[in-house]
Image (tube, grey):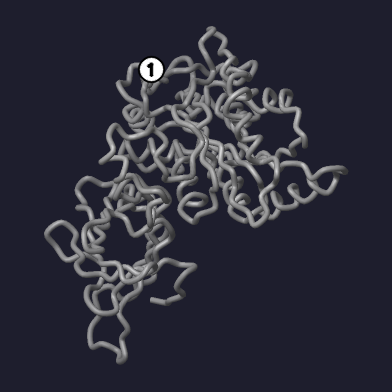
Amino acid sequence: MRRLAAVLFIATACRSGPTPLRLGTTYTVQQSGALAVLESLWTGPPRFTTVVAPSGQILRAAANGDLDVVITHAPALEQRLLVAPGHALLRCPLAASRFAVVGPAADPARVATAATAAEAFRRIAALGGPFVSRGDSSGTHVKELALWHAAGVTPVRRWYLESGADQAATLHLADERGAYALADLPTYAKLQGLASRVLFAADTALTNPYTLYLVRRPQAHPAARDFATWATHAGRDAVLALRLPDGTPAFVTLAGECAAPGVAVTPPPDRALRRAVPRSPPSLASPSAVVLLGNWQYVAPPRPHPPARPTLGAGLLVMLELDSAAGRTAHGRVGRWFAGDMGVRPGAFGPVTAQLGDSGRVTITIPATRREVAAITVLTARRGDDTLAIIHSARGNDAGPFAEGPGARFVRTGSVTAKP
């Protein structure tokens, strides 16, 4: 993040004349050719300075006020980092490409015959990969994690490699290793000399939507809104003209016009419904699992005196990482698990879910990767923004590993500092 901030400073400082518009976008926008189209056609004034990085970094820079406009393709991160905190002044659906599962032509996992993208990922896991991931909080990485979750699979290091690099470099690495990977199709089409093949793309779950956001800043750039209008009309038309090698469009139109996040764009069919449409973005108090995103640390009840025998949940160090949300359910993983002096690899657990219920109740489910081990279920209640008080903990029909009652809780780290 410091490196990105330095790039932003240098890019701005090295230009004279009117302050350039600061556009942040992703590697796939650049490597697919879409960014070159926008740069060549925008005449300003002023010109824009482009910063290219993974979606996660771009969105954090925007939230810090370092960018005027962003184009990203990670809806869950956009909601968490930009929309929910109120950093987005305008949301503009731009265009969509498509992801594809690519891999060796021999296709030992039989990905090409899968019925869904989730099944394709399950077949890769069943074979034992190999699979190369971006591993960089990019939109591609976020989509990949969602597909593993849909497949009910937690990748293991034996066959799962994180490149930490951009889309093109990741695809070249996967090609060298005869591995599978998730690819943005327009970017893949630009690369030369790859032996890997597009094996599966026929699933709506592989839609890759790009959205333009006008960033809320104390002093908005005077050209930001004009650029957003241009990019979603003349600029978008030029991007939609890009073609894949087979002649099909590289990008398709996303429905909708620019609007403040949370405000309906399509007029409702009758006056009664029109009166029911909120005029401002919905509050986080509404039943949305966005309020659960973050890292949650288990805190055992305080023990004023040494107990005569071990206490349930004492000496347990657990961190749950919830990084995406859909409706009332947040999704994530076990980031850390220590019981006494023995650590358990996070890969021993499946994808974690946190279901937001009525009256502030939250049900956390932590599955195990071994089928003979029952999932852990924890019933909690929200106590303020950063505390989940534990009401009940169970593993199947048995007692769960977490303590119950007064003092037993999960706290969101960064907002609350606590020690178990």
Residue 22 pos. (x, y %)? 70, 43
Residue 118 pos. (x, y %)? 33, 30
User: Residue most toward the left?
Assistant: 397
- Reply above or below: 206 against 155: above
Residue 391 pos. (x, y %)? 21, 70
Q: From the viewer's perspective, tell me whether residue 386 is left or right of residue 371.
A: right
- Reply above or below: 204 against 360: above
Residue underneath mark 1: 112
Residue 306 pos. (x, y %)? 30, 89
Amino acid on which disc 1 is placed: Ala
Q: From the viewer's perspective, tell me whether residue 133 is left or right of residue 219.
A: left
Give the mark count: 1
Residue 342 in view here: no
Identify the residue shown where x is 77% and y is 34%: 45
**Disc 1 packing (10 Å; few <14; some 14–19; many ≥20):** many
- Reply above or below: 358 against 302: above
Examine the image and state in which quarter residue 334 appears.
Answer: bottom left
Residue 379 in view here: yes
Secondary structure beneath label 1: helix
Identify the residue shown where x is 67% and y is 26%: 38
- Reply above or below: 218 against 303: above
Examine the image and state in which quarter residue 354 appears.
Answer: bottom left
Q: Nearer the viewer, residue 159 or 384?
A: 384
